[in-house]
Each structure stands twice: as structure tokens, then as C-alpha cells.
Image (cartoon, rainbow, N blue to C red):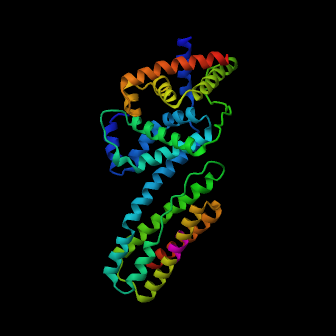
Amino acid sequence: MIDGEKNIIERAIGGEASAFGRLYDEYQPKIYRFIYLKVGHREEAEDLCHQTFISAWENINNYRFQGYLFSTWLYSIARNKVIDYYRAKKTTVNLEIETIKILEIGVSNEQLIDTRLEMEKAKDAILKLNSLEQDVIIMRFIEDLSPKEIAKSLDKSEVAIRQIQHRAIKNLKKILEINE
Amino acid sequence: MEKDLFKILKQLQNIQPDLDYSNQSRLLILLKNNNEKHRGYAVSDVLSWLNLHRMISAASLISAFIIIVFLTVSYLPGNKNNLVAEANEVNSSIQIRLDEIKYLLENQSPINLDQADIAREKLELSAQALNEANELNAQGVEMEKILEKIKAAEQALNEIELLLSQ
């Protein structure tokens, strides 16, 4: 959360582009990652992420600050964009493996290859989960959102989120074991 | 296994969007809002001008301003991004020109009938070019042609600004 986030959001609601720019800087990498892990393709993720922030900017007047992170609202917009994307596509999802860019500072080549392979495997395994399980895994274990925040973003109860989380981990392990 | 799994998932935090893409997307999103804000006062600018000068046909000038369409060219994945950025840059420049024209109209002494006719003509040219650009954009026509139209609109507005500042 950005310091003084509530104030920044209010300024953005008032039409101050630089305030929205700050929210973009803070949350765009997270939203991009969320979308990328759900569509598995860089260019599609870029396009959907761009659309997500356009929608957020156009509809920021509808945002109500309720003590939750601004990102929970952005995740729900991004989620709808991904749903629309798959609905419109109606073809086989492109699961082509793209090289994930990672920070390479202070890491040996061997370590780098291992890390990259692990990440690729995890990325592909996430793509095989159902949409809700993907959401919970990404938000909870990659983006560190609390079950309460995830519940808010997905419009579900905390109990339901914990159940989905349990099921998602089980399925993810199974997929990774099969792919070993 | 579970511990490893969480560790691997955490590593996915290293996935980052491309910096150029992020900067460009940010610029386009924030420009979009500026366009919409400007659309709101274009007509009132003309009305205040008409109140001040009352020397040319109100109907024709109003219609010219109303059909001025402020474009927001959409972000297109792929290699056209430079052209999209350029189109949006020119579009921003158009807004600056309009700000300047508005300022000149509000702060200058009344212009003569000939100047008003020329200004109206150029305004119509600019409106027409922007309208055509908007249609081409909606049809998904190649960006070079859209850019050409936007530049023509900018040129016409430059000429009005020059005329008014004489």
C-alpha cells in the first residue's frame, strides 16, 4: 500500500492524472503478473493489463474506499478482462513457453537455469488450474494478499477462499508431480 | 514439498512487465483522460468567443467545433507502438493549440470579418481531418494514414493560432 493511499485515490477520483499515475506505478506490475500467469502470453497480458488500467481510470468515480487495498478493486477488473478474453477467444489457449525474465544479479548461470526452469514449471502448472484456483494461488502466495482481501476482490467469503486455497495447493502439487 | 512449492511460487514475483511497454501504456492512459477533459469545454470556448465578437455565423462555427473529435488512439501490441505514441503526441499538441486559441480569443481585441472567415475555414478543415482520423481509427486502418490526418488537423490549428496572434 502506498503511503497516503486514500488521499491519492481521492485526488485521482477528482481527475488528477498524476495521482492515478502513482497508483499505476505501484500496482501495474502486480496486475500485469496476475494477468500474465492467467493467460500465459506476454503480448496478450500487456494488452489486457493496459485495458484494465483504462477501465480503472474511466471508472475511478465508482471506486469506494472501504479500508481495502486499491489493488483488490484492480484485481477484480483484471479478472473480468481475462474472463472476457477467454470468452472472445473460444479457441485453444496458447500455452507456448516464453522465457521468464528474472533478476540475474549475483546468481550463477546454473542457479539461474534452475530457477528459470522451476518458474516455467510453476507457471505452466498454474495455467492448468481452474480460474478461481489460479486467482487464489496468485493473490495469496505470489502477491501476499490476505484471505480477507482476496475474499473482497473475488466477492466470496473468507471461508470459501480458504477452501479454494486448500484445493488449489493440492491440485498444483498433483500437476507438478505429474510433470516431474 | 509444500515448502518448496511456496518458495517457487514466491519466485514468480520476479516476473516484471517490459519497461518500455509500461511507460507507453501509462502515457496513453493518462493522455486519454486529458482528451476527455478538453472535450468538455471546446463548445463553451466557442460560445464565449461568439459573445465577444458576434461577427460570424454562430451556427457554422458551433458545428465545426462540435464535430472536432479528440482522438485517443488505442494501444496496439506489436510494432506500431511508435506511431501510436506519435499520434497521441500530436493529439496532445492539438489540445495545447486549442488552449492557446482559447486564450487568444478571450484576451485579444475583436478580430475583423476576413480573419474570422479564415479562422472558421481552418477550423472546419481541422474538424474534418480529425473526424476522418477518428473514422479511420475505428475501421482499424493503418496508423500512417491516421497520423497524416491528425497532423493535418494540427497544422490547421497552428495556422489559426498564428492568425489570431498577429
Q: Quadrant of the C terminus of chain A?
A: top right
Q: Tell me: B67 left or right of B86.
A: left
Q: Residue at x 66, y 37 (%)?
A: A94
Q: Provide residue A24's location: percent of width, then percent of height.
A: 45, 41
- Majority secondary structure in the magenta region: helix
Q: Is B6 situated above or below A61?
A: above
Q: Is A63 situated above or below A161?
A: below
Bounds of the magenta segment: B125-130
Q: Tell me: A36 left or right of A14.
A: right
Q: Residue at x 56, y 70 (%)?
A: B132
Q: Residue at x 50, y 50 (%)?
A: B27
Q: Tell me: A160 left or right of B153.
A: left
Q: Provide residue A79's location: percent of width, then percent of height.
A: 48, 38
Residue A100 visible to the viewer: yes
Q: How many marks?
A: 0
Quarter of the image where one finds residue A105: top right
Q: Quick one: which residue is furthest to the bottom in this view?
A: B113
B40 or A86: nearer the viewer: A86
Quarter of the image where one finds residue B108: bottom left
Q: Provide residue A151's location: percent of width, then percent of height.
A: 38, 29
A3 or B11: nearer the viewer: B11
Residue B107 visible to the viewer: no
A44 in magenta? no
B127 in magenta? yes
Q: Residue at x 43, y 84 (%)?
A: B116
Q: Quadrant of the N terminus of chain A?
A: top left
Q: Provide residue A117's location: percent of width, then percent of height.
A: 66, 22
